[in-house]
Image: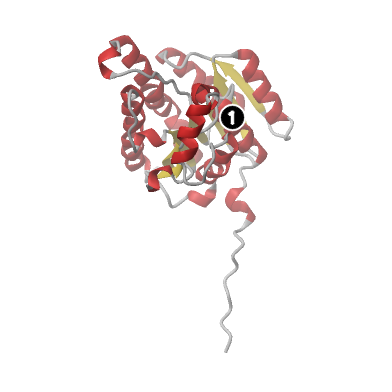
Amino acid sequence: MAVARASVDPPAGLFDLSGRRALVTGASRGIGRALAIGLASHGADVVCVARNAEMLKETAQQAAQLGVRAEWITADLRNEELIRTTVAQAAEKLGGIDILVNNAADDHDSSVLDTELVTWQRVLDLNLQTCFLLCREAGPHLIASGSGKVVNVASVLALVGVRDNAAYMAAKGGLLAFTRGLALEWARKGVQVNALCPGFIRTDMTSSLWQSPRGTEWVVKRTPIGRWGEVQDLVGPTVFLAAAASNFMTGQVVVVDGGWTVQ
């Protein structure tokens, strides 16, 4: 007697973000722009946040061409009051917030002995403290939605070490711990909180590496897939974490690194 096979095709609704409202930080370029447009391509309305107005407007325009509502807000997310205002404006523009993507980031390469306190603090502020403040302010909206999602964009350097990047690694490692803590707090409030750990992705932040033959050789040689990551490689995992497909998943880390951490 033949046994019926379960369908391998997931219901279309698992990845459908139609009617969902997303706030994406660091959306003026690179990873943030790709994620904002990627969410829009699956039906989400988006508010894009960063400091560069001209580039933000470009992101919003590209998202709007996909038939969704796309707004943009300029803000320096190191400022607590501006974060409060930004979240309030985003919720007002979209009528609420269902998805928060914490992507804004800063990096600095130097040894610990050569790192000034002001530099250490700057890196931790944008990569970690800003995420805490955004989650705190957006939390009531995410909980009110009944199915909120938080995607914290960390880094493979939260999991492995490289020389002369301790501040960034500390910030991103802290973000993973924060993700787990917040996931437990909101687990029974209808909000899932997860983190994304990109590997070496070609962006402006990593340009000093990929524009150098030696830097590119170093990255490609250590990446089992054998190439640099591209911003589009992060869209699918982010849509998954923002969609109903990940409803039974919280406090977890999705690593998208071409196999870097397998070794």
Task: Tell which of 53 and 134 is nearer to you.
Answer: 53
Q: Tell me where residue 107 appears, x and y as whole percent.
A: 42, 21
27 vs 4: above or below: above
Location of residue 168 by image quarter = top left
Q: Residues within 10 Å of mark 1 (few under 14, many from 20)?
A: few
Quarter of the figure with the N terminus: bottom right
Q: What amino acid is at disc 1?
A: Gly
Specify whether residue 90 is in view. yes
Specify whether residue 144 is in view. no
**Residue projecting furthest to the bottom:** 1
At x 32%, y 15%, the residue is 121
Q: Which residue is mark 1?
A: 95
159 vs 5: above or below: above
Q: Tell me where residue 186 appears, x and y as whole percent.
A: 37, 40
201 vs 114: above or below: below
Task: Tell which of 89 and 251 is nearer to you.
Answer: 251
Location of residue 45 by image quarter = top right
Task: Tell which of 214 and 6 is nearer to you.
Answer: 214
Circle 1: element type: loop
Q: Is residue 170 left or right of residue 38?
A: left
At x 27%, y 18%, the residue is 112
Q: Tell me where residue 12 appears, x and y as whole percent.
A: 64, 54
Task: Tell which of 217 and 85 is nearer to you.
Answer: 217
Q: Is residue 152 left or right of residue 7?
A: left
